[in-house]
Amino acid sequence: MCNKHTDPNYSHDVALEPIAADLYVDLKIVLRNSRDWHRREQRLTKLKMHPVVEAVIKLYRPMNWHLLVLEWPHLADDGTRLAYTRDERAGEADRQLVTTPGKYLRRHFPTLADDVIRDLVLQHTDGDFEFIITRDIHEIVSFKQHGPKSCMTFKRDPFEDHPYRVYDPKYGWGLAVHRAKSDGFIFGNALVWEGDGDDSDERIFVRSYFAPDREYDGYSYADQRLEAWLKDVGYEHHSSWYEDTKLARVQNSDGDTLMPYLDGHRQSVDVESVKCLRIRECGDYSATDTDGLLENNRAICAYCDDRCHEDHVRYVDDYGDVCDGCIERDFYWSEAGEEYVHADNAIETVDDGYIHRYRLGRYDYTMVTSGRHEDLAAPDDEVIYDAYGNVWHQDDMDEMVTLHSDSQCGDELVHNEAPDLICTVDGDYFDRADIGSVVFEITDGPSKGEYVALNGDSKIWQHFDNLWLLSEYNAHLEEVQGQLRLDDEQRVNADAEQE
């Protein structure tokens, strides 16, 4: 049952408990008795909504459960997609819309995680397939040999020589199989493990393999439908098998000890006894070879091809296992990505570290393009963007100014030495593109060449073709008028003296 405190896949602001089943039943009855078109739709679908919808409403609450039932989402005529009635008018006209179950769920459950929607659709879409888990060692080997291609298929080997014999069911192993009901064709398989008699309730799988059709012979991607089913029946997807998990110690027809390639990051084993092996993080024997045999714990550096002990290699994305010598010479450690990065792909960060140049977005980093930290990478929460799209580090914030709200880039940041930045006589900042619309250049008076905002504190005055600051124009006018008065007084005095 969905709960807002425990379910990370759902985040409605409303209560998260699903609607009680009897309420859905009551609403169906009300709609059937009150609307002829709804009675028609319910009868045509034998009172059943689409199986994906029926499944999801048992776990999660839709945004509007009344609307969902009113739309009566059901299987479309193709037997897979979803058909629904958008509104009353469409219902009376017997007109339905057809869409995919995933799109419909996103509409009514907008905050449900995409991977959860995907798994629900895969689990509850009918087709010619079924899922089983076998715990018979002969079936495990046979289903692996006839399933999707992998390095451990060993299709032509007899049972005695197949490396999957180590996955003895008495130690908790089994094989989940996704196969066709009609002819038994194996679409996918996945090793599964659960507690081997030590009262453990753990149930996990690490990797699945998938073949989309009978002719496919390429790389086996994950079988998402099988993985969704495994999760539904209680298995968790892990990155590796548990430390100390038991494997059977068995020999092939030549007397060599069998060992499959182990998926996950724990890829070595220790000998427990003449009958048992244990999976280890750093065991004495490697489980990374594809010949199906137990080898000593030696590794080959993927960078220089030298052999070395497995304890002296480190995994590097894009390369594989790289020896310590190559790591020290040609790689940098990235704290941001928690990985080794080749020098050709490493760029410096503002905190004197390194990060992979093609994985900035993955680790929430951005390249700084301007300022004191130009060409360095910085965490997303430490960068600022100016009005022109330049990226600055927060250390440069003291050199930034904010454009006036009337500017075309209003309230955005600009560096105080930006070439297109202008400052008005009132101390407000604008972009040069604002000239002529909300900012004007003063063309006469003491402030000639300065700028003034149309709605600023300082006012402008147009005198013929020239723009003045109003205060300066008034001062100039008073000066001219004063000079005229002085000239008149001097002329009057001169006339009086002549008389």
Image (tube, rainbow, N blue to C red):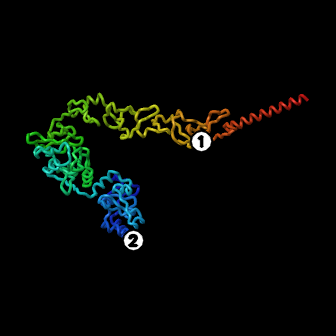
x and y, in percent, of residue 435 in the image: 59, 38
In this rendering, the answer to whether 389 lies above or below 209 is above
Whether residue 205 can be seen here: no
Q: Which residue has dot 1 on it? A: 437
What mark, if any, has residue 140 been given in the picture? none
Nearer to the camera, 409 or 169: 409
Nearer to the camera, 283 or 341: 341
Q: Quadrant of residue 149?
A: top left
Residue count near mark 1 (Cα–Cα under 10 Å), binned few <14, some 14–19, many ≥20 = few
x and y, in percent, of residue 393 in the image: 45, 35
Position of the N terminus by quadrant? bottom left
Nearer to the camera, 235 or 224: 224
Give yes or no for contact between labels 2 and 1 (Cβ–Cβ under 8 Å): no
Q: How many marks?
A: 2
Q: Earlier in the sequence, mark 2 or mark 1?
A: 2
The CA distance from mark 2 to mark 1 is 62 Å
Left or right, residue 229 beside residue 257: right
Nearer to the camera, 217 or 126: 217
Left or right, residue 94 beside residue 467: left
Quick one: SS at disc 1? Answer: loop
x and y, in percent, of residue 138 in the image: 12, 50
Residue at figure coordinates x 30%, y 55% from the top left: 121
Whether residue 376 can be seen here: yes
x and y, in percent, of residue 317 in the image: 29, 37
Q: Residue furthest left?
A: 254
Q: Residue furthest bottom?
A: 33
Of marks 2 and 1, the one in the foreground:
1
Kind of residue at disc 2:
Ser
Q: Quadrant of residue 471?
A: top right
Position of the C terminus by quadrant? top right
What mark, if any, has residue 34 been given in the picture? 2
